[in-house]
Amino acid sequence: MNIHPIVAGNWKMHKTRNEGVSFVSKIKNRVLDKVEARVIFCPPFTALFSIVEAIEGSSLSVGAQNVYFEAQGAFTGEISVEMLKPEGVEYVIIGHSERRRIFGESDSLINKKIHAVLGGGLIPIFCIGEKLEDRKANRTTDVLKIQIESGLEGLGAVDPTKIIVAYEPVWAIGASEAASVEQISEAHASVKSILAGMFRDDGNDVPLLYGGSVNEKNAAELIQTKGVDGFLAGGASLNEDSFCSIIEQVSNFYKR
Ligand code: 13P
């Protein structure tokens, strides 16, 4: 299967609605249809719907950073898939390490969210990744296996065009350096094999992004890493020049 490279920007809790719309409009004008990559903006909820409007008619897409698994009800502060879908949101980040660590999201909650997102026709960007202590204790593959198997539990099959996995080693997020090419290719090979063990060829074809201190300086090298189908960028996705440069580098690599 021909995987389209993906460059997703997780803005986390940054940018007001006006800042976000102006940022996306500038990127839209700069990248136009030149890019080979699927570009996904994941802004905070307050900017989400205005950004859907701002990208209309372009090849750019929008994702939410979180969602609750119930459709509606007494869940103060939460938003459902049914509320995102009609607004033109196509993707949802699920299981980000900040949600796991700061907001206590468990593998079983993440699994419920994945089912809700897929059931509602949105595409999950399912994040996994080991902590530094796991890596030091040689537990990286075990941790990834538990996260993947519990996160995707109960899915009889996956359609590789309807789900994205992002490997984000927790220790490389917002760090001074990304993981090394060797560390990434090794982890991506493990993830691919775990997915293939669960879903055979379809599992192997699921697009697998790397995230963790990706920037305009390391994107060209990291995109060549075996098993890397694109990036989930945090900090660098907030800066126009950095994000455009990452998109161009990924795109150029796939155009060769
Ligand atoms: P940084 O690119 O800032 O390290 O963040 C990565 C991330 O968490 C994306 O989801």
Image: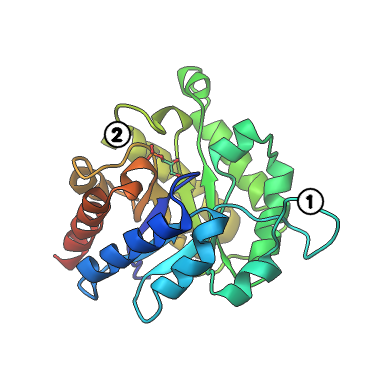
Amino acid bearing label 2 = Glu
Q: What element carries label 2?
A: helix
Residue 96 vs 7, above or below: the answer is above
Does residue 35 appear anywhere in the picture? Answer: no
How many numbered discs sit on the rendered protein?
2
Q: What element carries label 1?
A: loop
Amino acid bearing label 1 = Thr
Residue at the extreme right: 74
Location of residue 70 by image quarter: bottom right
Question: Foreground residue, 2 or 111?
Answer: 111
Residue 115 vs 58, above or below: the answer is above
Mark in front: 2 vs 1? 1
Look at 73% across and 46% down and name the residue there.
109
**Residue that badge 1 annotates:** 76
**Residue that badge 2 annotates:** 182
Look at 51% across and 31% down and name the residue there.
130
- In the figure, is residue 219 to the left or right of 124? left
The quarter of the image that holds ligand 1 is top left
Look at 64% across and 46% down and name the residue there.
149
Residue at the extreme bottom: 57
**Residue 164 spot, x, y in % from top left:** 49, 58
Q: Does the residue labelled 1 lie within 8 Å of ligand 1?
A: no
Does residue 78 appear anywhere in the picture? Answer: yes
**Residue 9 spot, x, y in % from top left:** 39, 53
